[in-house]
Image: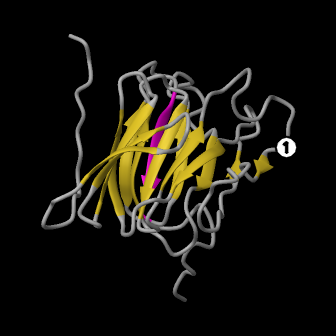
Amino acid sequence: PKPKPHSSFNQRASIQSVGISEDGRTCIAANNHAYVFMWDPSDSTNFKPIAKFHAHPTGSYLLKAKISPDCRQLVTCSSDQSARIYDISRGSGGGASVGSSSVRTPSPNPNMHGSGNSVAEGNGNEPFAPRLTQTLGQHHKWVWDCVFSADSSYLVTASSDHSARLFNLRSGEVVRQYTGHQSAVTCVALNDSSS
């Protein structure tokens, strides 16, 4: 029989995006059905995901996932016309603390657009659940790519709506919109370093 789509974390789907944090403590892989898997690569004896979660609503495609330079945030871009920001910091103030439930739904942001089907599960050794902090839903078509600023305070997104947008992540507001493209904007880069 044909497997049901989106029925479990063990589904067969192509990996759309991979990344590793600058501190080397977090590795991520995201598939096109909007599932994100996180590992701690420093634990070579138990290389099992520390978290698995559905980052966007069922039926949407995840197109990109990136970890911020400060290693505290994960952004995912999707066909649901949004970029979602998750708090992935572990330990004090981050995700779930040791002893908490291993399955948890991240807290939605009051400014969130669309439905959130996010569920995270820990591996039992280190329960952890990334927390949805913000949904940037100002684009009108698919959000293909994104990049954090060097200080992790800003995010630039690229969309099929022929625009790129610069967001202030503290306020969630669009600081600047780059328009005038004749076709979809499918990739973006940013160099805001002082050197």
Give the quadrant of residue 143. Answer: bottom left
Q: Nearer the viewer, residue 106 or 174?
A: 174
Residue 64 among magenta residues: no
Give the quadrant of residue 31. Answer: bottom left
Left or right relative to 134: residue 120? right
Determine which residue is flagged by label 1.
Answer: 101
Q: Is residue 15 above or below residue 95?
A: below
Magenta residues, start to end: 26-32
Left or right relative to 35: residue 63? left
Q: Residue at x 76, y 39 (%)?
A: 124
Q: Residue at x 52, y 86 (%)?
A: 2
Badge 1: residue crowd in 10 Å (few <14, some 14–19, many ≥20)? some
Q: Is residue 182 above or below residue 112?
A: below
x and y percent of residue 85 in the render? Answer: 54, 44
Q: Is residue 60 above or below residue 187?
A: below
Q: Residue at x 45, y 22 (%)?
A: 24
Give the dominant element type of the magenta stretch: helix, strand or loop: strand
Specify the quadrant that holds the C terminus: top left
Tag 1: amino acid: Ser
x and y percent of residue 4 in the render? Answer: 57, 81
